[in-house]
Amino acid sequence: MTTPMTTRRSAIVQGLAVIAAAAGAAQAVQAATAAGGSVAWPDRAVRVIVVYPTGGLSDGVARALAEQLQLRLGVPVRVENRAGGGGSVGLQALAQAAPDGYTLAFSAISPLTLRPHLGPVAYDPFADIAPVAAVMYTPLLLVATPAFGGTDFAGMAAQAKARPGSVRWATSGVGTAGHLALEQVQRGLGLAVTHVPYKGGGQQLTDALGGQFEVLSTNVAPAQLRHIEAGRLRPLAVGAPQRLDVLPTVPTLAELGVPAANISSLFGLFAPGATPVAVLERLHAEVNAVLAHSSLRERLLASDNLPANDSRAGFARRIAEESASNRWLRSAHIRME
């Protein structure tokens, strides 16, 4: 009989098998290089698919990263936005691209660790997508819009209990970290809210300012912080290990009694699954160099977003483990809208 423990173990084993295969391929490439071989990459423009619309935090970080990579690689690095499906549309395009190192994607890991548990996707999250480098951890931020008459998280929860469905909660899409936080809050506190999924962060922020819904799951970013400072948005909670320096009076979701919702998003760079390991290793090294010595690192730290620093194997392991931990979503009967 299959149990949650065995399915979790099988998912981790599957992910670790991919890691082991990649490690073996890396050794083969190293041996070939030592024997006089070389990888002539890159010799033309590289495309980076951003799986979210223009205007949000992830789009801005991806473009800043592309600029730095262009300087380091010596070829144009062009950004293309492919939003939709909580990131799955962009990753589908990546999975269908030639595995030659000239098409990459910038995405949170949720289209690999969350979205496949909520319904079919047109890619295998382990076989068709190769993790290249972790880029940043960004805390989740829950804010109230002008449509919400309360003052804090407790008021939002009270309204959702008293009038089920009256709190409209917007996220950047189905199967995103913001959506998972919503589901965990409903599950943990016995609430019923109305999910309003978007295709990414830009338009939902505009609609939040216009009061098109009551609350919004978003990221901690300069634009959001400016609107909070101006009083146009009110912070209700953050998803982080502790309170943020930029929002010291705002409690974490763990403090508010829903530790399972106290999550942050991990973003990274990805390639098609069969991309040569030597190319993946070169890209990993270049991304880590950018994060260690550039204005992008300072930009992330200034808004309480943390630059990530992990090996390729460590990044892949994190994805496998998080996917396994989310398998409960398969039987949660979550609506795909």
Image (tube, rainbow, N blue to C red):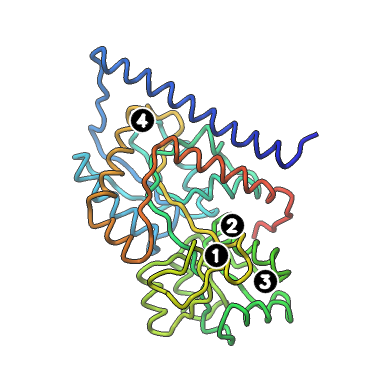
Label 2 and label 4: CA atoms lie apart by 30 Å
Residue bearing mark 3 = 193
Q: For mark 2, does the 10 Å Cα neighbourhood hold few (<14), some (14 to 19), or many (20 or more) residues?
A: many
Q: Is residue 321 above or below residue 50?
A: above
Answer whether labels 2 and 3 touch (C-beta < 8 Å). Answer: no
Q: At label 2, which amino acid type do we have?
A: Val
Quarter of the picture containing the N terminus is: top right
Q: Residue 300: give x, y in percent of width and height.
A: 33, 60
State which tag comes first along the sequence, 4 or 3: 4
State which tag comes first along the sequence, 3 or 1: 1
Residue bearing mark 4 = 100
State which tag comes first along the sequence, 2 or 3: 2
Secondary element at image label 1: strand
Q: Residue visible at 48% across and 37% down?
A: 129
Answer whether labels 2 and 1 touch (C-beta < 8 Å). Answer: yes
Left or right side of 116 for 22: left
Residue bearing mark 2 = 174
Residue bearing mark 1 = 171
Secondary element at image label 3: loop
Label 1 and label 4: CA atoms lie apart by 34 Å
Q: Residue visible at 62% across and 59% down?
A: 260
- When asked about the image quadrant of residue 76, the answer is top left
Secondary element at image label 2: loop
State which tag comes first along the sequence, 2 or 4: 4
